[in-house]
Image (spheres, coloured by chain):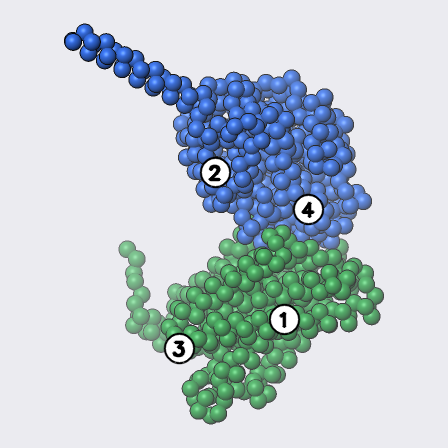
Chain colours: A green, B blue
Amino acid sequence: MATEVSAPNLALLRRRGIPSPAAIFGTLLVSAVLAWLAYNAVLTPSLFAKQFLIGLTNGSVYGLVALGYTLVYGILELINFAHGDVFMLGAMISATFAVQIFGLGANEAWYVLWPTVLLTLLIAMIFCGVINTTVERIAYRPLRGAPRLAPLITAIAMSFILQNVALAWKGPNYIALPYILPQSSVFSIGPYHYQWADLIVLFITVPVLLLLTWFVQKTRQGKAMRATAQDRDAAAMMGINVNRTISVTFLIAGMLAGAAGLIYALYFTSVRFDQGFQLGLIAFTAAVLGGIGNLTGAVLGAVLIGMIQAFNNGLTWHAPGSDWTQSIVFAILILILVFRPEGLLGERTPEGQ
Amino acid sequence: MKKRFLVAAVAAGALFAVAFGAYAGIAKVSRVSATPLPSSSCGPLQYKGSGSPQFIIASDLPLQGSSRSQTVELSKAEAFILGQQGWKAGKYTVGYQSCDDSTAQAGKWDPAKCSANANNYARNTSVIGVLGTFNSGCAEIEIPTANRASLGMVSPANTYVGITHSATGVTSAGEPGKYYPTGKRNYIRVVAADDFQGAADALLAQSMNEKKVYILNDKEAYGAGIAGTYRNALKHLGGIQIVGDEAWDPKASSYADLATKIKNSGAQSVFLGGLECENGGKLIKDLRAGLGNIVIVAPDGFSSFKDTIAHAGSASENMFISIAGEPFKFLGKGGKAFATAFGKSLGLPATKVNPYSNYGATAMVTMLKAIEGSNGTRASVTGNLFKSKFSDSPIGGFVINKNGDTNNAPISIYKVGGGTANFYKLITPPAKLVTG
């Protein structure tokens, strides 16, 4: 007969320094994963290193999307499911401008490539920023005082609306782009090459994260955002324009989605109207894993998800393989929500405990 | 008085009998004109014969997504044959409706749409037969519904083995019996099942002296099935090692990690069992980027050449694509005549007619012959489908066996070069290599 461990018993175990069954399970699971990774690293070191870099790069792209989720959640406690679709529209507008309007192709000279990419980046960021702010104004602001379920359902509805807008605009097929970013090798690990395109993704993600952190921590507007996130009423009493602050947050999240869209389009070279939803879910999982509301946590979570995918798909010794990737990613979401709802870097709150 | 009443009663009875007989005769001969299928899934009823059609042949194809260019032409080929035959099958007048089993959201066949379509065909008694489906996964949904309504189906394109017969390591438990709940078959196909195509692709690998191959599939019935027949044929052939066998995730953003793993396996060739619309273009690009000049072989799920080349770009160069049937130069008299006339109607040279259009035309010819020899009931038409035997048709001569399979099984291999798919070689696999 199984013995139930009631809440008072758990508290007793904690007081005596005895780990809870959840902590034991978590420790065993993480130890097993680390042992599996270590064995794979010894068995096929160059393959392991290459998968690490692939995971780091893919995770960086997920991180840009996850930052948007975490910003909006931080200020409104709203899971903005439409964010993934704003990102997808950013990828589509980037593909349209970069390839169809500016005519970028493979092997462009640097003085053609970079000004055009930067101009496309600016267009995508403005486009997505405007869309996200508009979504907030027409769909979320009227529900500001409504029960939590109402804006959540609205967010899902907005997601489908944006998907169908993209479907009507670009059709159901994948939009294929040429390899615009340089594909030449930066360095090699055994038979595997690390390309400039991979490095460029990191060169964009890291400064964006630093800039965003600086903006939120140091600027007047950032302080207003943090104040609004902590207590909306108190912030209003202190003279902060709450509605404007929330709009600015959506604008920044949208601009991040636009930047992510451009990088996604240029790096992954394939865009479809429904990709935002799938990638949005991955980014949301990353934000939860890192600690939703925490900027560094969102990027950390995204990089970890990227690595989990790469190691699972690409390692050879007892890796479940790509058949199981989605199941593993979303199983992590469940495990995090059950055992550590505040995420890896999140703070314990009365809700999260 | 009594006698007069008796005569009058007999006369009235005779008059009534004549009138009823005449009405019944009219009803039997000219049957109330066909009721079209709903416009939510189907195009308008096409009929250019005299009067109105007694029956409808419904075509069920995915008319949206990456196979659109192929399926729209295929549908036109079916209507073209019906038009050539004067919109008649023997004494019966027949109309045609082209129905769509795809959705814009899915960009390919959709299970809910397949189910709704099958129910529409089953309920509408004007529908005497169905030409379809294109995708095997959709056929798995539609066949049982049609089976309960004794409705015959002729597919121009389904190749998954388990729909008609079982094969070790390829089909699931209960296949194909579970698709025929009445116990009586109602489905035939004019295209060779995947056990032929898998065998032909394995022979291609052998002819290129490959020693290590990697197999991928897209997790769909068709994709997993063709990968299974390829695997079986390689094992029968011997001498070629399968160094990896797994699925690709159609929703993945990148396959760089998979490409790296394949490179580590030492594979000389990758087989892509699946559909191009399952992110196949991106998969080819990432494999080419990560694996350089590795041999990429794909089955007819990638045979919408225009889309495959457009989505994969230069990465598709030198890849091989197999497709059931023969190119124009190998076609018989019937095949060449059809391709020439049909191509002319589209403004295309005969050599540019998509190979699947010949299969669509053959599906229509087969259905019309079955209707012609029937008594006008669905059951009779369905029974006749299994007696199909042609010495010549748009795909050449063939016989349908008791499972509903054809014995016409040449497989064409195309190689992409210079941005087009060019005929490479014709392979007719020997019976001993075919798992079925």
Q: Nearer the viewer, residue B115 or B177?
A: B115
Query: Which residue position is annotated with label 4?
Result: B307
Between the C-alphas of marks 2 and 1, the distance is 44 Å
Spatial CA distance of label 4 from label 3 is 49 Å
Asked which secondary structure carries label 4, the reply is helix
Nearer mark to the viewer, of 1 and 4: 1
Q: Which mark is residue B37?
A: 2
Mark 2 and mark 1 in contact? Answer it, CB < 8 Å.
no
Q: Chain of mark 4?
A: B
The quadrant where residue A181 appears: bottom right
Residue A200 rendering spot, x and y as whole percentages: 72, 68
Q: Is residue B348 visible?
A: yes
Above or below residue B92? Residue A129 is: below
Mark 4–mark 2 distance (CA, rounded to whole Å): 30 Å
Question: Residue A327's x, y, as percent?
Answer: 50, 55
Write down the chain letter for disc 1.
Answer: A
Residue pointed to by mark 1: A127
Q: Earlier in the sequence, mark 4 or mark 2?
A: 2
Foreground disc of the pair 3, 2: 2
- Badge 3 element: loop
Callout 1 crowding tier (Cα within 10 Å): few <14, some 14–19, many ≥20: many
In the image, is residue B58 above or below residue A27?
A: above
